[in-house]
Image (spheres, helix red, strand yellow):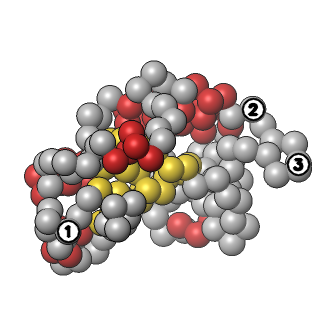
């Protein structure tokens, strides 16, 4: 089982009383910690909770809590994404999405415990359009993703390099 890691990967946000720390099984059985967090912006699915969020509310609070809970564990952002719906559900601001991608990837690249980011690259018509790549149709230029994801601390890592991160 040397090639299997046990990941503790809760959602970042939770209802009061269901914080992820309450479910953490401990450092002896966890190899890496991940969490999911999204900028829903003004997607229709978030009718009662529409606002544009950035790293200060989407990542930093959870990274701080993880650092207290398990300071020796590497962290991955196991799912993240942003919509382009900036001020209301009918306002698709590609520049705002590009700025978000660049700014938030820059923040994550400066967090020493973060060893990976997985972007949720899907268009879900019943939810939000998270896409930054094409699917046979013409999409706007998402330079924010290209710039953010090519930030110097980010790199492709093979299995041996990833394994070396486990304490």
Camera-nearest residue between 78 and 58: 78
Q: From the viewer's perspective, tell me whether residue 62 is left or right of residue 158.
A: left
The location of residue 89, given as percent across then percent down, is: 65, 56
Secondary structure of residue under mark 2? loop
Say which residue appears at 35% left-offset and 68% top-offset: 1
User: Is residue 56 shown above or below 46?
Assistant: above
Q: Using the image as rendered, state which of residue 89 and residue 163 is in the foreground.
A: 163
In this view, 47 is above or below 131: below
Q: Name the residue that disc number 3 marks.
A: 137
Q: Which residue corresponds to mark 1?
A: 29
Question: How far apart, in angstroms, are the residues tagged by discs 2 and 3?
Answer: 12 Å
Residue 89 visible in the shown view: no
Q: Residues within 10 Å of mark 1 (few under 14, many from 20)?
A: few
Q: Quadrant of residue 164?
A: top left
Horizontal placement of 83 versus 9: left or right?
Answer: right
How crowded pointer 2 is (Cα within 10 Å; few <14, some 14-19, many 20+) is rated as some
Mark 1 element type: loop
Pick the residue in front: 56 or 163: 163
The spot of residue 73 in percent (x, y) is 21, 51
Circles 3, 1 touching at the beta carbon (< 8 Å): no
Instruction: Tell me how far mark 3 sits from mark 1, CA to CA.
Output: 44 Å
Residue highlighted by disc 2:
141
Between marks 1 and 2 in the image, the one whose residue lies nearer the viewer: 1
Can residue 160 be seen at all in this image of the molecule? yes
For marks 1 and 2 on the same chain, the one whose residue lies earlier in the sequence: 1
Nearer-the-camera pick, 116 or 157 = 157
Which residue does the image show at 13% across and 58% down from the upper left? 69
């Amino acid at each position: 089982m040397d090639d299997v890691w046990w990941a503790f990967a809760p959602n970042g946000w939770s209802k009061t009383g269901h914080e992820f720390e309450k479910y953490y099984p401990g450092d002896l059985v966890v190899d890496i910690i991940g969490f999911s967090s999204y900028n829903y912006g003004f997607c229709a699915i978030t009718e009662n909770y529409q606002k544009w969020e950035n790293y200060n509310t989407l990542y930093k609070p959870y990274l701080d809590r993880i650092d207290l809970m398990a300071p020796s564990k590497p962290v991955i952002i196991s799912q993240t994404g942003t919509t382009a719906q900036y001020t209301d559900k009918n306002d698709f601001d590609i520049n705002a999405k590009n700025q978000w991608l660049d700014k938030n990837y820059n923040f994550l690249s400066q967090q020493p415990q973060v060893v990976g980011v997985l972007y949720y690259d899907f268009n879900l018509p019943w939810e939000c359009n998270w896409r930054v790549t094409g699917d046979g149709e013409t999409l706007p230029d998402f330079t924010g993703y290209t710039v953010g994801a090519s930030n110097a601390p980010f790199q492709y890592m093979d299995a041996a390099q990833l394994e070396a991160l486990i304490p």
